Image (cartoon, grey):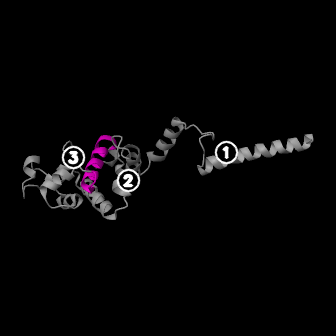
Amino acid sequence: MRSTKQTRKVGILSATRACLSVIMCLSLAQCTKDAPKAQPNPDAQAKVETKTLAGAPAKDRCRVCREKHCSNYQGVFNLVEACFDNADAAFVKECTAAVACAQKNKCGYKTLGASECFCGTAEIGACLQPGVASGPCQEEWYAAARSKALNDLSIRFSDVTFPAGVATFLLECDRLNCPECVP
């Protein structure tokens, strides 16, 4: 039979182990479904985010906005990961070049979207004819479409398996959700 002193000691050890388990669980993100979960405080998070981003450079505010709005775009696609963190280095290079050209030339953020960067002042229908396009980013969009054929290019503007498709939708996401990304 245990003495009161031993029982108290076992109780304290059990409580200490439980506390350590919770601390380790929370700090190392190794929680099981039975472990207590901390409830986020959206008001506190918003205050911290606003305070942190208020004086931040536009580039940082753009990145945060894209993480929030373009990482699960239309509920199906992570445009941020596809364009900037893709395992295919060539894909990243082609996608980011198209987006950078759009930003530099302030095209692709209006209703016509990315086609404005390729077509320029040419009407979209006419733009598919050789030599008609006058946009500032033709070279980048051909590279992002991975083809010099205008028919391929027109299809790949909306095909997210190509850098051109990802860049197109990223510019759209910026236009609709992230004004801090629009030049």
Kind of residue indicated by mark 3: Gly
| 180 vs 23, nearest the viewer | 23
Residue hosting label 2: 81
Kind of residue indicated by mark 2: Glu
For residue 68, what is the image quadrant?
A: top left
Residue hosting label 1: 22
Residue hosting label 3: 113
| 41 vs 153, nearest the viewer | 153
Q: Do the residues labelled 3 and 2 touch (CB within 8 Å)?
A: no
Q: The N terminus is located in which quarter?
A: top right
Residue at x 72% of width, y 44% of height = 18
Residue at x 22% of width, y 55% of height = 105
- 15 sits to left or right of 67: right
Badge 1 or badge 3: first in the primary sequence: 1
What residue range appears in magenta? 160-178
Which secondary structure lies at badge 1? helix
> Mark 1 and mark 3: span between their CA atoms?
50 Å
* x, y percent for residue 44: 54, 38
Residue 4 position (above or below residue 162): above
Kind of residue indicated by mark 1: Val
Main SS, magenta region, reads helix
Which secondary structure lies at badge 2? helix
User: Is residue 81 in the magenta section?
Assistant: no
> Mark 2 and mark 1: span between their CA atoms?
32 Å
